[in-house]
Amino acid sequence: MKKTSQESLLREHSPEEIEKRLKLGGKSPNVPDAVLGGIDGCVTTFAVVAGVIGAGLHSSVAVVLGFANLLADGFSMAISNYESSKAQRELAEGIRQIEAEHIERIPGGEREEVRQIFQQKGFSGEILEEIVKTISEDRRLWIETMLTEEYGVQKAAPDPYKSAITTFTAFLLVGAMPLVPFLSSTLNTQAQFILSTCLAGLMFFSIGSFKSMVFDMPVFISGFRTLLTGGIAAGLAFITGHLLRELFDIGMM
């Protein structure tokens, strides 16, 4: 992780910057959705390309299977992400309702839970009792405190629609790149595959680099790791296609 300069740290921890950061902190970013969708989209389509070429099939097969998988898998992944994000929100809302009922029926027991939670954090005496008093006087704060401290559930659950759209868009845009060379009728199959490989490699490395900049990681290492992951997946697909070609004596179409 890169070491931040003292000047940058002081600037980032000014009252104004802290207030701005805390306000944004409640909003769930969709960067992980974009990264996941992009990587999976590129792996999906380039694995199809590698498998088709490894099997010695015509390049048009790569186009048909590639775009079919691109749309079907992209839609499936988007729906899965939507349901996952929706489930997180429903879980948090269910816990809120349970805690609201407990606060209504057994407020003493809920105060004791707050007390023990913050006691485990090292607070004691008058300070501990003041914390319990402050939290229990605000019903909304009380419920949200129990949500995060007792159940470990984040308040900022991702928006299901944004997660699904981000995943699907990244899946389609990045996943389509390895298929572009096969749309050209002026290139032979070998040239198409080489260009497709270069584009896929560029996509993998770019996604890894983008991820590193967002999460403050070394750019080259993150890009190379993502490239290596995609390369291994494509290599497995190519070898599988080649072995099946030999096993079933598949010829060029």
Image: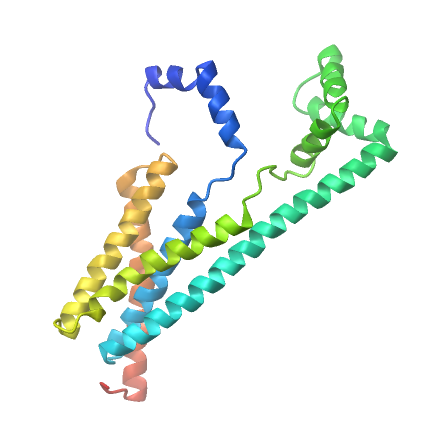
Q: Name the quadrant of the C terminus.
A: bottom left
In this rendered view, identify the residue nearer to me: 158 or 127.
Answer: 158
Left or right, residue 145 beside residue 251: right
Left or right, residue 97 beside residue 180: right
Identity of the residue drawn at 36% across and 34% down: 216
In this rendered view, identify the residue nearer to me: 18 or 115.
Answer: 18
Task: Please tell me in which quadrant of the rendered image residue 124 appears.
Answer: top right
Vertical position of residue 46 compared to residue 169: above or below: below
Left or right, residue 130 beside residue 82: right
Q: Position of residue 179 (x, y in %)?
A: 27, 66
Q: Position of residue 56 (x, y in %)?
A: 23, 80
Identity of the residue drawn at 65% across and 23% down: 121
Task: Please tell me in which quadrant of the rendered image residue 214 appears.
Answer: top left
Vertical position of residue 47 compared to residue 114: above or below: below
Q: Position of residue 71 (x, y in %)?
A: 40, 66
Left or right, residue 217 beside residue 30: left
Q: Position of residue 113 (x, y in %)?
A: 77, 29
